[in-house]
Image: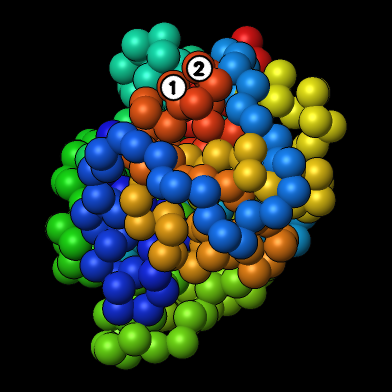
């Protein structure tokens, strides 16, 4: 399982600051809770199928976790930022899904996947030369971060830098290294990083600063970054945040493409929600579906966070809807 957690599953504030670093826990013990008293109506029984789709978060339950380059402020200069922004401009969520599929499913290395993407998308065209020098790009301990790090390497090399990608681990390790200049660049997630820095600089359990609106989130993120010597480039359209997935067959059978449609058509006893055990308490998971969308489910299946158990549960017809990451290669259509 990828060792990081989207803000959307974690509690906000101080709890988020810690949870984001270690993940929301490993795979839970598989099992389904008894039907809940709040569920009424027939609901929508699971429908097995291989192709998964993410239901549109049409009421903006999740905050904006767009990919964004984080740079040690002493290393930041216009040419370096412009090169990183070229990566952001080239990435949207469907392309990030394909990159993750290339690594996680097709078994290409992050380096190979990034180089193929850069070639196909003419990534280095028009990149201006910077002052040069050595740059270390830090990457988290999961494949997506490593692939993004390789894309940053390609862009920065085109700008005239000598670049090394170094896997550092979780945010607790690489964020202080970024502040100190031990690494100069890290691929980040806007809302998650904003809340991490918000908690770090204020302490305790401060009010959240991120938002479903990416401009609001980036404004807050840059303000928090200024306090610790971290500069941020432009956010990509690509997002990696919590998504609620169903099989294509389920969506076709019940006519649902959005979470509002899911709530309207599928609230009831037959609907099974799957995800990590903590989904039942966290504000952007089951309680958020209930509060924002009015969805009531018949039962909850304790699985994992965006991992193989949840995806298998969807595909084999054990759960109706499951929590997985929006950039997961399972959403690839080819």
**Residue 60 appears in the figure:** no
| Most distant residue in the right direction | 255
Residue 261 drawn at (x, y percent) = 81, 46
Disc 2: CA contacts within 10 A as few (<14), some (14-19) or many (>=20):
some
Q: Is residue 313 above or below residue 278?
A: above
- Asked if disc 2 and disc 1 are in contact, CB closer than 8 Å, the reply is yes
Mark number, residue 193: none
The secondary structure type at the circle numbered 2 is loop
**Colour scheme of this structure image?**
rainbow
Using the rendered view, name the quadrant where residue 188 is placed: bottom left
The residues bearing labels 2 and 1 have C-alpha atoms spaced at a distance of: 6 Å
Residue 316: numbered disc = 2
x then y, percent, for residue 150:
36, 32
Residue depicted at 31% across the width and 60% down the height: 20
Please state the horizontal and vertical placement of residue 209, each as a whole percent of the image.
51, 80
- Residue 87 position, x and y percent, is 53, 40
Disc ID at residue 312: 1
Q: Secondary structure at mark 1?
A: helix
**Depicted 75 relative to depicted 326: above or below:** below
Q: Nearer the viewer, residue 182 or 236?
A: 236
| Position of 298 relative to 195 (above/below) | above
The residue that appears at 70% across and 25% down in the rendered structure is: 250
């Amino acid at each position: 399982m990828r060792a990081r957690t989207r803000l959307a599953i974690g509690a906000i504030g101080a709890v988020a600051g810690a949870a984001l670093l270690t993940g929301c826990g490993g795979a839970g013990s598989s099992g389904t809770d008894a039907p809940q008293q709040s569920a009424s109506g027939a609901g929508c029984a699971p429908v097995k199928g291989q192709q998964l789709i993410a239901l549109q978060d049409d009421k903006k339950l999740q905050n904006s976790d767009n990919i964004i380059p984080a740079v040690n402020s002493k290393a930041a200069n216009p040419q370096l930022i412009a090169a990183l922004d070229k990566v952001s401009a080239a990435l949207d969520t469907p392309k990030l899904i394909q990159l993750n599929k290339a690594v996680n499913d097709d078994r290409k290395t992050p380096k190979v996947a990034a180089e193929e993407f850069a070639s196909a998308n003419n990534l280095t065209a028009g990149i201006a030369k910077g002052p040069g020098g050595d740059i270390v790009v830090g990457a988290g301990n999961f494949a997506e971060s490593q692939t993004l790090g390789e894309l940053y390497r390609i862009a920065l090399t085109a700008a005239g830098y000598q670049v090394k990608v170094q896997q550092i681990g979780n945010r607790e390790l690489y964020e202080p290294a970024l502040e100190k200049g031990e690494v100069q660049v890290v691929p980040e997630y806007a809302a998650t990083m904003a809340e991490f820095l918000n908690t770090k600089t204020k302490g305790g359990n401060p009010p959240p600063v991120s938002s479903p609106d990416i401009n609001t989130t980036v404004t807050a993120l840059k303000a928090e970054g200024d306090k610790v010597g971290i500069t941020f480039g432009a956010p990509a359209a690509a997002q990696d945040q919590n998504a609620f997935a169903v099989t294509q067959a389920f969506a076709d059978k019940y006519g649902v493409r959005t979470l509002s449609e899911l709530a309207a058509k599928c609230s009831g006893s037959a609907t099974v929600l799957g995800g990590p055990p903590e989904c039942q308490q966290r504000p952007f998971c089951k309680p958020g579906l209930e509060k924002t969308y009015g969805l009531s489910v018949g039962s909850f299946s304790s699985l994992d966070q965006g991992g193989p158990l949840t995806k298998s549960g969807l595909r084999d017809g054990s759960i109706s809807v499951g929590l997985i990451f929006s950039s997961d290669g399972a959403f690839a259509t080819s």
